[in-house]
Amino acid sequence: MMNQAYVIYQLARADFLERVRRYSFLVMLGTVVFLGYQVAAGNIYIQMGDYRGEFNSAWVGSIIAIIASLFLGWFGFYLVKGSVARDRETGVGQIMATTPLSRWQYTFGKWLSNFAVLVAMVFILAAAGIVIQYLSSENNQLHIFTLFAPVLFGTLPMMAFVAAIAVLFETIGFLSGGFGNVVYFFLFLMLIPLGDNLRKTNPALEPLGAGLLQQSMGNAATAAFPDYDGSFMVGSSDTAVRGIFNWSGVEWTPAIVLKRLAFFGMAIGLTLLASLFFDRFDPAKRRKSGENKRAPSLLNEQHVSSLPPTRTLSRSITLTPLDRTPIGSTFFRVFISELKLLLKGQRWWWYAIAIGLFIVSLVTPLEDVRTSLLPFIWLWPVLIWSGMGNRELQHNTYQMVFSSAAPLMRQLPASWLAGFVVAVLTGSGAALKLFGAGDTAGLLAWFSAAFFIPSLALALGVWSNGQKLFEVLYVTMWYIGPMNYVYAVDFIGTKGNGNVGFFIPLSIALIVAAAMGRAGQLQR
């Protein structure tokens, strides 16, 4: 048993050290520090109707705990997910498969590593709470346990649960890629209404850990201000604070703590379940996607067919210069190949649903098309767009692509144009509806979105060398803007005429950024 624990510890330790050296960890760490600064500056806070609590250790610790649960519970998943895939791609997994390391030991080590990364983020934010309390100058009496208790019992169980879900998703084939990233986004959204129900019945079992805090804060607010309306808001508000009450924190009884620790038990259960799905890096058990099968042949068609035929080696070797055919004469062929790379490999039902959405958009009232249908139409190809700009590195064909003639002037614009065509084709039903109604402003917003989406995908794909950043950022923007009608990020224009004056210049800037990123890749 001691030997098994040591093996798991070493696996988790090595994986943790590898992760904290990655740029993604530094970016997330910077975001966490920025959130702490926003709390200290008073831009993010908790407000109970027209009232709030005094900035003592309990109140500051609770703000930190809720923010950490929301932010890291939602986006921390994407930070830690990918470790199993990285072992598979780098060949480390195949080496591990030759050792006596069991499947449950591997998944348990990955869960511990995921959890350690999230815990590091949480405690950096919690440590900032000490500074926040002193900067507030309302109550300088520091109580360490009171400050950290909401994090220990509220946030860490949620982090353990998120870490386990990340391992489970990576071991289930169809959830290990971009589809799993989108699924988790919406699963987390479902936790919010679930939490609302649990706050009324059993707040200790509310996953985010905010239920207990809200209930206790509400009781204190009602005792101090009987006219308190029961509302609870996290973020910022234009409502002026009319009163401040004292709140000493949640009474963490053994029963409450045990209920919160139950999430660790569920996390361990999910980790053991993941070990049943884990294929131990056996390629025979892993079904490869259609894109992976087709990518090499299409890339060969795109970039190698124009190269001169292979010559028999001799003592005197003469290198044939790259084809100097004018760019315009081969651009169309490169574009067709890029479009094939985007669309081939999709199942028949993907096309059937896309055609169904096209037909539905023609027979649906115009207002419903703009506010409800078009956002879902342009969510459907998200996993197609996410491959733009990074496919060459993902399939290890960048040596071939980057060494072809004029890759910056041919392949990159062709890739963007292919993504733009996908946006136009999938959204063409809505465009016809807008054109038939004479909605010029709506058509302009539609064009702005079709222009922006592939630009964002290409820039993020080139600079991140992966799909995850676009998938997460795009779906987040989609949810905040078009679905919740936040004008600043409503790139589709579901309400009004859309923020065209911002997104068209931004799209141009993103294309330039993609070109600069690709130019840097060509020089390496």
Image (cartoon, rainbow, N blue to C red):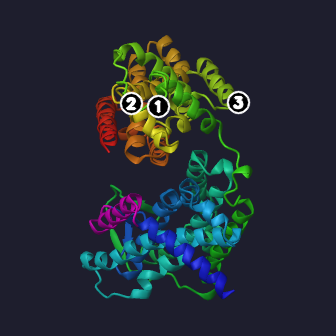
Mark before the other along the chain sequence, 3 or 1? 1
Please give the residue where the numbered disc 2 appears in the rendered image: 317
Question: Per the image, is 244 magenta?
Answer: no
Distance from Cα at disc 1 to Cα at disc 2: 7 Å
Mark before the other along the chain sequence, 3 or 2? 2
Of residues 177 and 12, the one nearer the viewer is 12
Callout 2 secondary element: loop
Of residues 376 and 324, the one nearer the viewer is 324
Q: Is residue 497 visible?
A: no
- The amino acid type found where label 3 is placed reads Trp
* Above or below for 180 versus 92: above
Residue 122, given in percent of the width and then of the height, sits at 44, 72
- Say left or right for 212 vs 270: left
Residue 314, given in percent of the width and then of the height, sits at 44, 30
Mark 3 touching mark 1, by CB under 8 A?
no
Distance from Cα at disc 3 to Cα at disc 2: 52 Å
Of residues 368 and 191, the one nearer the viewer is 191
Residue 185, given in percent of the width and then of the height, sits at 55, 51
For the C terminus, the image quarter is top left
For the image shown, how many numbered marks are present on the structure?
A: 3
Residue at image x 51%, y 69%? 15
Mark 1 touching mark 2, by CB under 8 A?
yes
Q: What residue range appears in magenta?
A: 21-43
Please give the residue where the numbered disc 3 appears in the rendered image: 349
Among the 4 quarters of the image, the one containing residue 30: bottom left
Please give the residue where the numbered disc 1 appears in the rendered image: 313
For the N terminus, the image quarter is bottom right
